[in-house]
Image (cartoon, grey):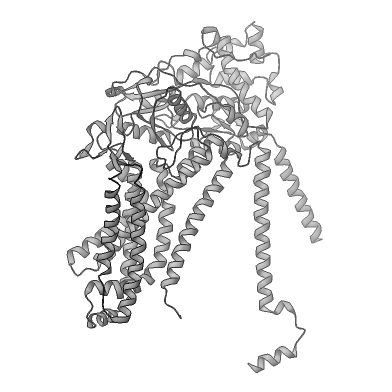
Amino acid sequence: MNVFKTLAVASAVSVCMAGSAVASTLDAVKEKGYVNIGVSGKVIGFSAPDAQGKWTGLDVDFGRAVAAVIFNDPEKARFTPVAFKEAFTALQSGEIDILSRNTTWTYQRDTKLGIDFVGTIFYDGQGFMVKKSLGVTSAKDLNGASVCTQAGTTTELNLSDYFVSKGMAYKPVVYESADEATVIYDTGRCDVYTTDTSGLAARRSTLGNPKDNIILPEIISKEPLGPAVRQGDQQWSDIARWTLFAMINAEELGITSQNVDEMMKSKNPAIQRFLGVDTNYGEFMGLTADWAYRVIKHVGNYGEVYDRNVGPATVLGLERGVNALWTNGGIMYAPPIR
Amino acid sequence: MSKVARSETQHPRRNLLNDPRVRGWLAQALVLMLLVIVAGYALYNIAHNLNKAGITTGFAFLSSPSGFDISQTLVDYSSRSTYADAFVVGILNTLLVSILGIVSSTILGFFLGIIRLSPNWLISKMAEAYTEIIRNIPLLLQILFWYLAILTPLPGPRLAMHFSDIAFLCNRGLQIPKPIFEPGFIATPVAFLGAVILSIFLFRWSKKRQLQTGRRFPDYSIAIALLVGMPLVAMMLTGFPLHWEMPVLSGFNFAGGITVLPELIALWLSLTLYSATFIGEYVRSGIMAVDKGQRDAAYALGHRPWMIYRLIVIPQAMRVVTPPLISQYLTLVKNSSLAVVIGYPDLIHVFAGTALNQSGQAVEIISITMAVYLIISLFISLIMNWYNKKYALRGL
């Protein structure tokens, strides 16, 4: 009797284990009732708590959009600040479902680390910030400078490439966190602070005297920042990718969070397809017909999200630049939904 | 005794399981088996999951170019060097700060321990106050204090504090002249080595002579004269083949000379000051453990106070001091990994930090790093245990 009991329990356990092994991320997320988004948590405009303690930023709004697609409720996104050093491991190990942490999409990260980047939410490039008092106006004058930066980033590698290619010397001063690197730069330990230009703008606003620091005109790298998912779950990767594309397509189609309900009556077949008026494109991803509608209704299109978080009216004050739609002279372009 | 022997012979075929020795073996074998199974499962699990997640594994990354620079490199290194080179740079930086810390904290610690026992009230209370304050503040805070409150607020290079234009102290670190060796300099270290060997023979000879005749020979003074004189003579004969490269302000920073990073200074200072308080306490307890009668006896025999310390007290105190001293050294080496908070490029910062993220090989890099700390610690233990065994009381 006892033996049978044990066997029964053992087989039940193994069935459960097998079950959880094949379960999709979408099912797991639905079951726990929220989607866990890994964010940096400290970069104003991308992901940081505001004065009321509510998460705001471009990366955060993407997470809300994914939650809206699945749950029809943007508040079903939980944000976990992950240190850069632990970010990829957190995603690989399943601690977070999506990494939305102003992370650069590179070949090695995409192919070697067991993660997949799903697109670019912000086209960035690395720049330099210096104290005005140094009298430097170009990155070409930085020979011999001490440069503060963050450990383990693409920034660290581009920095080396740039100085090697220009035949200049520099002294790296590398810290674990961007916070620390900024604070130390402010003390004068380094002449230069380098990171992506969006980050420079965000960091400058937190310095003792922001106006005493200038961002040099040179952009030394391509930094396509985008969300990433674990490799191996195609459905989950599609959901993340097409949530981002929906935000971009909506801006192109002129659908905003304000007019989305009126747009339901639009005669434009592209808009009808997008909002799932009489099609059910959502089912191909295991979602509902109104998946894209939910994104725009709850979070807004890409332009709205951009302006709200990093646009000219915010502390960062970043013009659209290359992040404008392809129809407006930028490179933001999403495949059509059809 | 004979009773037990008889009872054993009366039951020659008793159950093996009742034999405490066999049971001990069995228990140990069982534990070992469990350990092997758990370790094997863990390894299999890691390999399986990494494979499933599509993460490249293996140690091939060590020979690919690292692509990043490091602020302090004791060997040639650039961003075109390999991950293995970065690993070596990290180890050397860890060893550098550990060895500097061990040497300076030992000296300061012995000094503290001895002056705390001084009959002078003021001196002994000062040592006590220092010990109580420093060892009760977490090391991490002390590192941050030295770095953020003392070293980084120093003036910039253009306003550096200077010492007769030879050394400069600023927020970029301490700039000191760098010795440049010219051909022919090799004679000087060779002469020094010769002096060391000669001194050893001298000590042996004078000790033997003292044991045989009771007469003392001024071996210390002669050894010092040899150690200083022979290299000096060698240098003069080869025409001083050494000059100094002075640090000069050029552009943003100092060029030439040696830069001692503020990160290194902060870490070294705090490790030294902190560990010295513990070593001081061990030394004090060691000295106090030596029976007062020993000192009185030595005094009665006519030894002078310094000789009493050197010949009677310290050798006996060392037996008490050595075991805790070993663990203090081990702690110091492991504490050096706090370097990470101020960006000193030690093994953790360079290898388990930057290299880990750039290569993505978390499991491999963390295992290598743990192995390195283990080896360093075991090596220190080995040396100190050898020393302990040599000086421990025999026949106990």
Question: Where is residue A26 shown, x and y percent of the image?
Answer: 66, 32
Instruction: Report if residue A245 is visible in the image.
Output: yes
Quadrant in the picture for the C terminus of chain A: top right
Residue A70, quarter of picture: top right
Question: In the rendered view, does A106 fall on the left or right side of B93?
Answer: right
Q: Is residue B224 above or below residue B235?
A: below
Of B144 and A304, nearer the camera is: B144
User: Farthest top residue?
Assistant: A267
Question: Where is residue B370 shown, x and y percent of the image?
Answer: 52, 50
Of B203 and A280, nearer the camera is: B203
Q: Is residue A27 above or below residue B103?
A: above
Of A280 and A7, nearer the camera is: A7
User: Farthest front residue?
Assistant: B237
Instruction: Report if residue B348 is visible in the image.
Output: no
Question: In the rendered view, does A155 fall on the left or right side of B231?
Answer: right
Identify the residue at horizontal 65%, vertical 59% (top origin): B35
Question: Where is residue B103 shown, x and y percent of the image?
Answer: 35, 56
Question: In the rendered view, does A60 fall on the left or right side of A287?
Answer: left
User: Farthest bottom residue?
Assistant: B2
Question: Where is residue B280 shown, x and y percent of the image?
Answer: 31, 63
Identify the residue at horizontal 30%, vertical 39% (top origin): B173
Quadrant in the picture for the N terminus of chain A: bottom right
